[in-house]
Amino acid sequence: MTWGSASEFFAMGGYGFYVWGSFGVVALCMALDALTAIKRHRDARAAHPEPGENS
Amino acid sequence: MTAPVFSAVLVRDLRLAARRRVDALLPLAFFAVAVSLFPLGVGPEPNTLRQIAPGVLWVCALLAAMLSVTQLFATDQADGSLEQMMLAGGSATASALPVAIAKAVAHWLLTGLPLVLIAPLFGVMFDLSGRSIGALCASLALGTPILSLLGSLGAALTLGVRNGGVLLILLIVPLCIPALIFGSGAVSAVESGSSARGHFSLLGALLIATALLAPLATAAALRIATE
Amino acid sequence: MLADIRFFTFASPPRFYALAGRLIPWLWAATALLAIAGLYIGFFQAPTDATQGDAYRIIFIHVPAAWMSMLLYMVMAFWAAIGWAFNARLAAMVARAIAPTGAMFTFAALWSGALWGKPTWGTWWVWDARLTSELILLFLYLGYMALVNAIDDTRRADQAGALLAVIGSVNVPIIYFSVKWWNTLHQGATISATTAPKMVATMLMAMLLMTLACWAYAFAVVFTRTRAVIAERERDAKWLNEVVPS
């Protein structure tokens, strides 16, 4: 599939809103999903007890 | 060993409900109020009401059943009697199943059966034909036990949990959807003149499957909650 | 000979934590490569569809997301059940880690499906079997997450969650068929979903690559979240404090 120009690519034959609306929102969701997981891990590691506090 | 536990729990629940008759009637009052909201919100056009009646009546019955099931185990757990019930058969493993079944049966007798009995009144409010009202009662007669069984499962799962009531509705309503679909579908079919036999067969099958499986799951949930 | 293989060695949280930590960068790399390949073929090699125009290209994210949403639910229910049956802590942690990603993919499938439906069917939504069941799947994920978060006692939460997840997995086919029967029982009911066009090889290749990309992504995120859950639960454990924070 050869697109004539960049604007043709973004237009997606008139369906640009739907195609990029799908891919865009899903990409955003995946980024949020990944970032919240990474942040959760970082926060969990940061909250470790001081040495000598182990019961 | 299971029969005495079952009858003891069932009789106790019914007796307690008889002493607090107002509490037992609350789900029915909710049903009445909720159902009455629809003609007020949607408009009194008889044709519209007749069309939405099966769905509205079924959804309100579902919500009434879910709201009343939250207290199924909670009050007993709060005063320690649930623990006693769980030990009544000798061990939690032996008692959990009869307790689960008895609670579901009690809930149905106190909420489901009355709903079946008062439904015709509201069917008339929505201008349903006589045959449709008959189908409505039959579908609720088959469907409300399913709701009680699934509701008791939800109550056991959310026992003692914050916001348990809302959480229960979120968890159990998806599971009730097949019953809702076939139940209201049966009434719609009769109202539009076609046969509801398929709906009733499926509803019956759903009831049998739920009756066989839900108590086991509820018993497991009770054991998890009271460990 | 078989007895020499330590099958359950990675059922131990510290070992899994270390292994996952090493695998995660590779999983991200795989995700990126597969996604680039899939998207390239999907947008630059697959031809325009005769009936749907270029709108059909949504399929390259919609179908993988839908497949992942269903696959992840079964995997989540499986590990939750294992955790419950064998009292295996790590299995229960993995189940919890899967849920948010599974819910995300379910939403992605519903969203992309709506945006695909509007130009092709003329409507954002129809209440047919597949869409309704997928919506209910989202509710099942959210219900699971709500339940395990509402119960403070970790072990009880894991067990209750496992029971709910297993019940949900039994219910998913029931819901799918009941909604399908409802539409067929109701004469003259709704539109049936237009089936996807017969697959051209490039389209199929792009879809498979995107599915693999989503799968690698899911592994990467679920492993990361599992490590987070391990770190939270084993906060006081000595082994955790000796591990270099990563």
Image (cartoon, grey):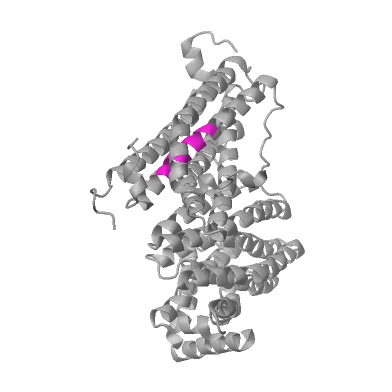
Highlighted range, magenta: C216-227
C120 or C18: nearer the viewer: C18
A45 or C218: nearer the viewer: A45
- Give the position of the N terminus of chain A as an image quadrant: top right
The verdict on residue C221 being magenta is yes
Residue at 58% x, 75% y is B119
Q: Is residue A50 left or right of residue B222?
A: left
Mostly what secondary structure, the magenta segment? Answer: helix
Image position, residue C139 (x, y; %): 51, 52
Residue B61 visible somewhere in the drawing: no
Q: Is C42 rendered above or below residue C143?
A: above
Quadrant in the picture for residue B103: bottom right
Image position, residue A8 (x, y; %): 50, 13
Quadrant in the picture for residue C195: top right
Image position, residue B57 (x, y; %): 56, 67
Q: Is residue B141 left or right of residue B29?
A: right
